[in-house]
Amino acid sequence: MTRLGQLMTMSGTSAAQLACNAGAALVATRVLGPDERGIMVLGMTIGSLCALIGGVGTGSAFRRQICLAGGDRSALVSAFARCSAAGALSAALLGVAGTAASAPLIDTALARPPFLLAVGCYTAGQMVAGQVVDAWFADGRFHRGGVAAAVTSAGGLTGVLLASGAESATTLFLAQAGGVAVMTVAEIAALRRGGLLSWTPVCGNAVTGLLRLGAPTLGLSIGLVVVLRADRYVIGLTAGTAAVGVYSLAATLGEIPRMLPAALGQMCLRDISLGRGAPNLVRTTLLAVATTAVGGLLVGLAAWLLVVPLFGPEFGGARELLVVLVAAEVCFAPFVVASRGLIGGGWTTAAGVLGAAGAAGAIGVYGVTGSLGGAIGVAVGSVVLYGGLSIAAWTLLRRRVSAPGIEQLRGR
């Protein structure tokens, strides 16, 4: 398949995944109202972060190592399966603990046992679904990986639709987590048929190799989630769950134009993993920025007209927030491409440091801007933060793919 064909295929499956995720979020928003929706969003925020922690970066490490393994990769595949199983359980427990600890700070509803069960199920499902997608991508089967991501998201949307008659954040959250789980089990079976899942005996070196290479990328993964999701948490602390619900609607709509930069980033990762360098890095980055800007403009215009008629006047503030968040997405597009390129090149330490710096910056920026300006302040803070991360990531990648002796630089 040509690069254009790969890009169109990945964009199509990314669009399907995004449509399902956005659809689930919009249905839940319409059914629940600001307060209950805010509680659900906070559970998803904590769960998403813990899902990445549970993976310990092994998905990215697997994608890097399988390109170098050649025909003998059974031990690597088996080690990846073991890491994924252990990570799912750890992630679920961590998600429950993190949500319960947040309840006294934000809302006691977060500590209700049924809601904690929903958080645990959602966290484990997100972690395993992400590992499945990484396994397909590692084998160069971008279309199949994209289908897996879209299918699991469709399961979540189906769950939300089936439970939409219950005006409860816990019920909708459990239904979404259950739908994702059902489809993830089906995708695990497909992964086994495709030769990318095995439980054959494996030596400890294969497992530790994945953990050793993956752990540094955890800084980037966690940092990215903190950058993209900590805004909700800060708003919950400073303005309450209703403000989280309104902000989440704007953020959901603002993230719609991100699908093409995400596809470009995945292709950049594989190109560099295979030693092809980063062809047309400047052009790729400009394409990512331009498409995000056009998509953001269209989404913004549609949302300005439709948000109040569809969701009610209590969500009217999402329109002003969306204008700022679309600008933030344009600033973020170069980071989406360049950060994947750093992982593909094996520059995991640089990627991890960048992610950790982004997380620290997010806590500081969102904390200050949220205290001063509430939800709109946090949105403005995201513009500053996203722009800074894009400049840093693009500069790091550009220097490495342009430097002589590129192979010696990998991993530093």
Image: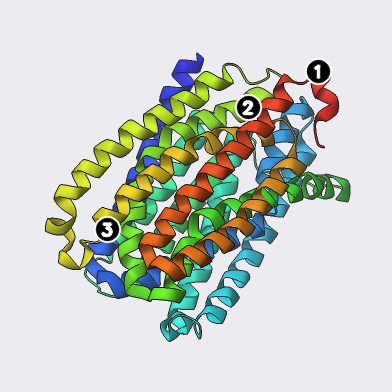
Write the residue at 49% across / 58% down: 229
Q: Residue furthest top?
A: 2
Q: Nearer the viewer, residue 28 or 319?
A: 319
Dot in front, 3 or 2: 3
Amino acid type, callout 1: Pro
Dot in front, 2 or 1: 1
Q: Is residue 189 visible?
A: no
Tag 2 secondary structure: helix
For label 1, count other residues whose C-alpha is less than 10 Å away and answer few (under 14), some (14-19) or many (20+).
few
Tag 1 secondary structure: loop
Side of 233 relative to 66 (left or right): left
Q: Which residue is mark 2?
A: 270
Going from N to C along the chain, the mark reached first, 2 or 1, is 2
- Residue 45: where, in percent of width, then height? 48, 63
Eyeballing the image, is 408 above or below 321? above
Structure colour scheme? rainbow
Residues at marks 3 and 2, CA–CA distance in whole angstroms: 37 Å
Side of 249 relative to 101 (left or right): left
Residues at marks 3 and 1, CA–CA distance in whole angstroms: 48 Å
Residues at marks 2 and 1, CA–CA distance in whole angstroms: 20 Å
Q: Residue furthest front?
A: 372
Q: Which residue is mark 1?
A: 404
Write the residue at 74% across / 41% down: 350
Q: Is residue 326 visible?
A: yes
- Residue 62: where, in percent of width, then height? 70, 40
Tag 3 secondary structure: helix
Q: Which mark is residue 318?
A: 3
- Residue 325: where, in percent of width, then height? 37, 49
